Image: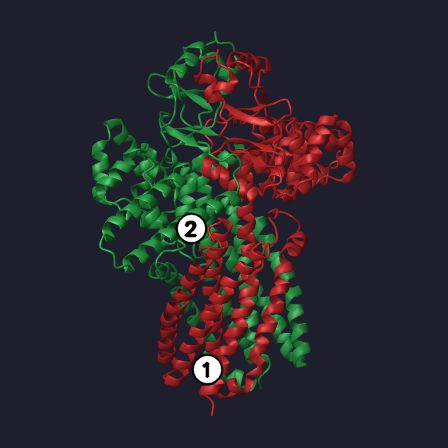
Chain colours: A green, B red
Amino acid sequence: MQSSEKIHSAQFLEQQLQEVTTLLEKQQLEKSLLERSPANNHELVAAMLQNQHQARLQEKLVYLHPADTAFILESLPLDQRKTAWEAIKSGHDGQILLEVSDAVRQTLISGMAAEELATVAGQLNTDEIADLAADLPKRTMLKILRSLNSKERKHLNAILSYQENQVGALMDFGMITIRNDLTLKAIIAYIRRLGKLPSHTDKLFVVDQHNKVQGILPLQRLLTHLPSRQVADVMVTDFVRFQIDQEAAEAVRAFERYDLISAPVVDSQGKLQGRLCVDNILDFMREKSDEDLLSQAGVGEEEDLFSSVWKSARNRWGWLLINIGTAFASTRIIGLFEDIILQLVALASLMPIIAAMGGNTGNQTSMLIIRSLALGQITPGNVGRMIKKELTLAVINGIFIGFIMGLVSLLLYQDIALSAVMAAAMFINLLVAVVVGLGIPLLRHKFGMDPAVGTSVILTAVTDSMGFFIFLGLASLFLIK
Amino acid sequence: MQSSEKIHSAQFLEQQLQEVTTLLEKQQLEKSLLERSPANNHELVAAMLQNQHQARLQEKLVYLHPADTAFILESLPLDQRKTAWEAIKSGHDGQILLEVSDAVRQTLISGMAAEELATVAGQLNTDEIADLAADLPKRTMLKILRSLNSKERKHLNAILSYQENQVGALMDFGMITIRNDLTLKAIIAYIRRLGKLPSHTDKLFVVDQHNKVQGILPLQRLLTHLPSRQVADVMVTDFVRFQIDQEAAEAVRAFERYDLISAPVVDSQGKLQGRLCVDNILDFMREKSDEDLLSQAGVGEEEDLFSSVWKSARNRWGWLLINIGTAFASTRIIGLFEDIILQLVALASLMPIIAAMGGNTGNQTSMLIIRSLALGQITPGNVGRMIKKELTLAVINGIFIGFIMGLVSLLLYQDIALSAVMAAAMFINLLVAVVVGLGIPLLRHKFGMDPAVGTSVILTAVTDSMGFFIFLGLASLFLIK
């Protein structure tokens, strides 16, 4: 569990990365020198050098925590990463595969034979194998399944049958179950016989003969109560448990609220199915928040910093193509007003401002709504008040920003009518932006869809088109004779 | 620590919220009916009703976990929130104040007298008082400081002297320290005498007479080793510790990597100063990721869903004003080319597309760089390769997207020269976007600034201005005689 370094710091990791890179570069250099040399004993020397380098790399990497090795692999360019990965035969391979990001894992797995992969996976727990399953070739998965005993196979199937946003996909099986008629002394003796507790064991689960969870026994109580007492007297019967098909996001909120370290996962009959631990919750949170940030910027998924250019290109094109579509569509509105622009060309410089500001305010509103929805703070009871508040805010914003817009336009063009149209168009487009920024996430949520997905694309398309339409429309009504 | 409900679920909380809202609405209704009634015993009846409602509310809220009460308070409109808060005299007030969001906390504190606040804060640990400190009036803080003993005062000062992104600001003092010459039996007896361990105690800290941390004793080892053994033989000397002035983000990464529950915080001499726990890490992560998402959308800080409209307006204006500035500045470029637009008005519809697509691709690049920088994956050794890859990608993107742009323009306007200008402008602006999207975060990082802050604003300003300039400039060179 613990790193081999006493003080974890970014500098320490950077230094390790530097040293590994130096080793790898030296190896590459010697290899290329050797290839150009005219000597006969070429292959022999090459093999010797190779072994020497492997040994040095292994020496370096074997003392590192798997997560640190994973970090170093992620930071290495593809060719060096492959060399380093081949040198690692530390027995930690499985853990390292678990720790690297999805994109990097694929580059590591792609070079491994099915047998090799199956051996590596054999070092892992079933819940860890489940994490890898999506990235493993079918042949390898079959091999792994055959090597498991029936209980492990049942566990693996259980996890794989849940979607990644459900509690079942996040659980592990490292729980210790006890009966309530034992004494604490017996429990302590039992633990001593086990010799080792699964990581993150802060409580034992008390179950009846049907495997139903009756209570929990925190290690704390085990330590602070007299050994002669019975589990039934000391256990906590009022505890947080999760349904196996519950949404993972709800479990995350519960871990945050109740400061949990581990909690039982049960089925609809209350039977113990597994355990949720804070380390998996932390990983899930990190993944979710990274996904949210990247999708905000229109990137499909986490990228390997050194993946092939083509792979990265494909990851980014989807959203760009949609944007080309909406951009052309919304600017078609401008095409309708070309006569007006020819009569008053200043409109061409002012119209992008109306469109952009609409997008900005709409995005502010929708992001706040999306967050409140995610936190479960918006309910049928208060949604009306919330909409009223946002609309009031939009009116105030519209007056304030519209006024500034009008003022700046007046300074630039000394045309009162034009400035009035600018101010009015800004006011109306801000109202449109807020209505759309409120409406899309609320409606998507109402119909059971993720309120975040695509909201910003639709919003920008609407505020752009409406911005051009309102501004040029008002101009054609009031400015052109 | 545990919720009083056996299965935590969003439905349960929504139902609680619904019930509290119903109670509060009934109370409001009866109050307003009473005020309109002509009876004499007005005040007496009002007081009676008031008491009755308070009692019912208290009954409802007293069984809830402070975090759940906090959720309900956050979801209540201001007037109802105030009534509910006054009804809560459950002794949990301090915990509830800790759990609500910063914005909501201010609405609760604003109605409380200094004495009352000092009493509430008196229920809390020093690290919890530190969390509230920023929101408490000076007078209250002085009162609280006077009520603390010298050790507590020292602790409070220690935490308050660190910035919120440093480890020192996240630590608590709930650690149990032991000496290495004791037997496990003595430790177990000591814990039984204590009667209770601080929450999140998964290990005890072994210190020498100078308070230097020599090792850790996981509870697991305490339970699995023979009671006759000495701490010195059983303790782990190879453990993760944190420097008190280290960056909190680094500690978060270490907790994720090494799956920690708690870890010692030391000063530069290795002396124990406090303890970091996973619950505070979880809260810090949540706050950071929320901040990142909101600042992406141009919202300054978390908002109270029901704060006054003026407060919300001020929270959103800052960024909007900056955007007005950049929008006017970049569209000034269009003003320079008004003659060109008059000669070929189709340019007016096409130019916003070039600007928008530049912003989109630039944002994709900068977001990926910002994330890699945050993860520490970009080092002096690999930054060159990374830049080369992004530039190659930009060229491929430019050719692909430029081609599509040209094609669509050709379909719309049947003008080969115009389409060629469109394609070329898109190509060049995508290169500009990627250079800026790479350059800003890398440079900001190099000079020790947060690479995320303001990147998207500067980027959009540049890609807009350059988009207009490149497109209209090329048009004036090649399309206009």
Query: Type of residue at label 1?
Result: Ala
The dot on residue A22 is 2
Alpha carbon of mark 2 to alpha carbon of mark 1: how far?
56 Å
The dot on residue B416 is none
Q: Quadrant of the N terminus of chain B?
A: top right
- Provide the secondary structure element on which disc 1 rests: helix
Observer able to see residue B463: yes
The dot on residue B346 is 1
- Provide the secondary structure element on which disc 2 rests: helix
Task: Reply above or below: A137 against A30.
Answer: above
Residue located 63% across and 71% down the image:
A423
Badge 2 crowding class, 10 Å Cα cut-off, few under 14, some 14 to 19, many 20 or more, is few
Q: Is residue B452 left or right of residue B353?
A: right
Q: Kindly identify which chain the residue marked by label 2 belongs to.
A: A
Badge 1 crowding class, 10 Å Cα cut-off, few under 14, some 14 to 19, many 20 or more, is some
Q: Kindly identify which chain the residue marked by label 1 belongs to.
A: B
Q: Residue furthest bottom?
A: B481
Residue located 49% across and 86% down the image:
B476
Q: Position of residue A360 (x, y in %)?
A: 55, 62
Q: A426 or A112, which lies in front?
A: A112
